[in-house]
Amino acid sequence: MVNRVRRLVADGQPANGTFVYSPDPAVVELIGAAGFDFVVVDTEHASLGRREVENLIRAADGKGMSALVRVNRIEDVAATLDAGAAGIVAPRFGADAASRELAASLRYPPAGTRGACTCSRSVDYGIQDLASVAAAADEEVWLLGLIEDRAAVEALDDVLAVPGLDAVMPGRSDLAASYGVPGRLDDPRVTAAVEQILDAAAARPGIAAVVYATDAEDAQRWRRRGAQVVVCSIDYKILARAYAAIARELKAAT
């Protein structure tokens, strides 16, 4: 496994991705054909089963992209990585014991607690030797922690020190709710929290600063604040807006 996101970050290059909610691998293929570097397959908010996730990862691999997967539970990490995911996106990440346990589950012993399966997609169903794959997998895998509540922001130094953490991304919508201003993503308190997270990540070696952007202009705004990796919008949102724009043009033309 080669993690394109990790390689771009290590080379000081920008990396661009998008969320995927659709179960259709063709959507991932067109995202890759369009020139994106990675996708984040979302199992927290989207209705995606294990087999569908594996097929989306397979489609990303076919287009030279990396597939990160947002999971709800630590119990989902092993199967997701065995399916070939390049990394895990962890919601509500903090400095608590549960977050530390999840972080450890991404890597094989002795570095972590990942289970050793010798017949998964990640080892070509047993054709590759697990012993030769494990070391490389530990190096390539990526853990992206979502900072989504006020408590995590206030304990940011401890969060960034969690062993195994590779990157952090502010969750603006959840941060707004946590600060008591749900839906107000540009509230000064939310903006200050996002800037604090990005600044702290950029200042800490080994931790990448990731941001969710609604569009290219929003992405540029946060790149100026030090975000190296951008997750831009969601497949369904992009599709909906494209069709809405075409519908308006058609109506105007008639």
Image (tube, rainbow, N blue to C red):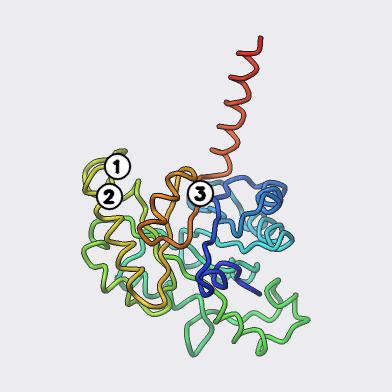
- Give the crowd class for mark 1: few <14, some 14-19, many >=20 residues within 10 Å: few
Q: Which residue is mark 3?
A: 232
Secondary-structure class at tag 1: loop
Report x, y in % for residue 169.
40, 59
Label 1 vs 2, first from the N-terminus: 1
Left or right, residue 145 beside residue 76: left
Label 2 vs 3, first from the N-terminus: 2
Report x, y in % for residue 196.
27, 60
Measure the alpha-carbon separation of dots 2 and 3: 18 Å
- Give the crowd class for mark 3: few <14, some 14-19, many >=20 residues within 10 Å: many
Secondary-structure class at tag 3: strand
Q: Residue at x 41, y 74 (%)?
A: 165
Residue placed farthest to the front in the image?
Answer: 224
Residue placed farthest to the right in the image?
Answer: 127
Q: Which residue is mark 2?
A: 191
Secondary-structure class at tag 2: helix
Where, quadrant-wise, is the C terminus in this rendering? top right
Report x, y in % for residue 128.
74, 83
Q: Residues at badges 2 and 3 in contact (C-beta under 8 Å)? A: no
Depth check: give the residue in front, 125 or 191.
191
Q: Which residue is mark 1?
A: 186
Q: Residues at badges 1 and 2 in contact (C-beta under 8 Å)? A: yes
Three-letter code for the amino acid on which mark 1 is drawn: Asp
Position above or below: 253 against 95? above
Left or right, residue 64 beside residue 42: right
Report x, y in % for residue 133.
66, 84
Measure the alpha-carbon separation of dots 1 and 2: 6 Å
Where, quadrant-wise, is the N terminus in this rendering? bottom right
Three-letter code for the amino acid on which mark 2 is drawn: Thr
Q: State which quadrant residue 163 falls in.
A: bottom left
